[in-house]
Amino acid sequence: MKNKTITYPAIFKKESPEGYYIEFPDIKEAYSGSTSDDMKFAMEMAQKALKMVAKVYMENDMRLPKPTSLNEIRVNQGSIVKQICITIEED
């Protein structure tokens, strides 16, 4: 087995004073939430969501979509775009 590193942009939308809704514009099945205003924790939640969905894609021989570049993503005021990087094992 070898490792594959992938990176996708995630949008962090402030849902409440203490939480984010997290979505990946390129992979609609990958989303999560955080009940903390701690961005480090929210990014960990995003990594878990992306990893789970990427594994499903790979197990079903589905090709992951090409990531959108950061400068092409438009967000509403109060939202943040961050790159999320994960490493998964390939067969």
Image (tube, rainbow, N blue to C red):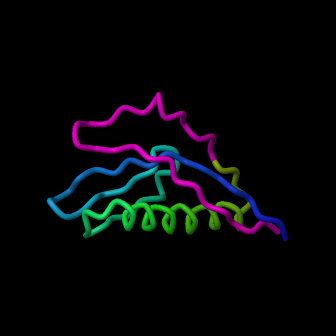
Coordinates of residue 7 in the picture (x, y in percent): 60, 50
Q: Position of residue 84 (x, y in %)?
A: 52, 53
- Residue beneath the point at 47% across and 28% down: 71
Q: Quadrant of the C terminus?
A: bottom right
In the displayed structure, 7 sits above or below 4; it is above
Q: Is residue 24 magenta?
A: no
x, y percent for residue 86: 61, 60
- Count of marks overlaid on the render: 0
The residue shown at (40%, 43%) is 81
Rendered-image quadrant of the N terminus: bottom right
Quarter of the image holding residue 76? top left
Left or right? Give the position of 38 relative to 84.
Answer: left
Residue name at image x 54 percent, y 36 percent: 68
Q: Residue at x 63, y 66 (%)?
A: 56
Residue range in magenta is: 65-91
Q: Nearer the viewer, residue 74 or 40?
A: 40
Would you place residue 77 above or below residue 31 in this image? above
Was residue 86 drawn as part of the magenta stretch in this picture? Answer: yes
Q: Is residue 86 left or right of residue 88?
A: left
Closest to the observer: 44 or 63?
44
As rendered, which of 60 and 76 lies closer to the eye?
76
